[in-house]
Image (cartoon, helix red, strand yellow):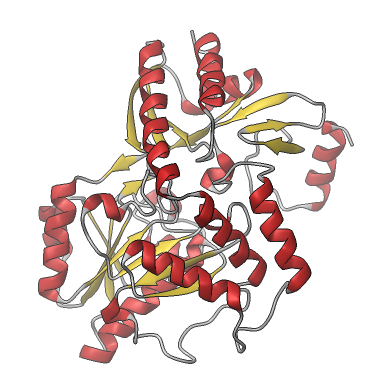
Amino acid sequence: MTHEELVRLDHQYTLQTYGRFDVDIDHGKGARLWDLAGKEYIDFTSGIGTASVGYGNERWAGAVARQALKLGHISNLFYAQPYALLAEKLCRRTGMAGAFFGNSGAESNEGAIKLARKYSFDKYGKGRGTILTLKNSFHGRTVTTLAATGQDVFHNYFFPFTDGFRYAEPTMDGIAEVAGHDVCAVLLELIQGEGGVFPMEKEFIHELAVLCAERDWLLLVDEVQTGVGRTGSLFCFQQYGILPDAVTFAKGIAGGLPMGGFLVSERCRPVLGPGTHASTFGGNPVCAAAALEVQNILDDGELAQVQEKGAYLRAGIEGLDLPCLGKTRGLGLMVGVEVREGYTNKELAARLMDAGLLVLTAGHNALRLLPPLTITREELDAGLAILARTLV
């Protein structure tokens, strides 16, 4: 198949809900991808942070193949080993007490929202179901997670949105302005990814955690993008010195297969009992086996390298002193790059893709870089070289 044939097929038979770049991808190895014509790309996107252990990873593929031959799927009405072993691994590595598995980031955040509202209902009854989220946040594409998202640009077309959310500036004064007796939880990203890769101030997060404890609000941390090693620890909250009541995950958890979920603290473990929440494909054996191998690959030594690679990448970008790019921000291999006035992130992303480097855009006119966590120094250097010769 040619590129043109693929584009025609896409346009004829799929809903045009994506603003695709004019690039096709056929196969990959490590952090390198090739299109149908054989052109090579360095990938600084990893499927928006999903291909956490790279492409063509033999350990990951072997785990998937073995489990697919053994048991591809079984109802959650029965026990199966892969999801139970994964839950144990995640809880032991994070200090959390229990896991629920689903399919996507939006579904994960929906589950955490249900957890918070039931926790409050069980203790206080009706009328205490409002959840505070932060301005510039992004929590998903369902009607409820769009309502939770603190960006006006997403609040269109799909009215009426789910009630029960208020948006705060990411300061204690901002929280105080929208707080009330009807609040049950705060839902936030520790690094606002889609919003422009803006890390939260640690002092703010610590003060917010204290406030949540004082008012018996659940602290819900959305780590759909920051989780599973992306920032150089298994979860970003571990670098902030807090233990959330619930933390959501998806994207990189299964190395490219569709999986999500959330972990809960000990006090929230009993909240969702039989019949209160479910997901047909949640904990699917193949996805869980893939996620277990991702956990094995991303051991503590590999996570330490993620921090080193992130520092190397940021220093390399800033050292190029390119006229269109400003400072970098982020943690680990979640890197935002300021695009200077007079340039647009979409324009720069298109130029880089033409030159063989795949990057993402984000809010506030930023480039967003999310390479595979197993990317090599050689692959980072190849990407930096493309930056240097393309954006002069």
Compare residues 52 and 275 and report the one nearer the observer.
52
Q: Quadrant of the N terminus?
A: top right
28 shown above or below 322: below
> Percent from the top left, x then y, of residue 19?
62, 40
Compare residues 215 and 141 and report the one nearer the observer.
215
| Residue 355 in the figure: left or right of residue 208 | right
| Residue 92 in the figure: left or right of residue 85 | left
| Residue 174 in the figure: left or right of residue 327 | left
Picture quadrant where residue 358 is located: top right
Compare residues 360 and 35 and report the one nearer the observer.
35
Observer able to see residue 41: yes
Picture quadrant where residue 383 is located: top right
> Percent from the top left, x then y, of residue 113?
37, 73
| Residue 148 in the figure: left or right of residue 31 | left
| Residue in the picture at 49% in, 61% down | 105
> Percent from the top left, x then y, of residue 108?
46, 67
Compare residues 153 and 110 and report the one nearer the observer.
110
> Percent from the top left, x then y, of residue 202?
18, 48
| Residue in the picture at 54% in, 46% down | 52
| Residue in the picture at 39% in, 78% down | 114
| Residue in the picture at 41% in, 12% down | 320
Observer able to see residue 160: no
255 shown above or below 339: below
Question: Hey, which residue is sitting farthest right in the picture?
Answer: 1
Picture quadrant where residue 175 is located: bottom left
- How many marks the image carries: the answer is 0
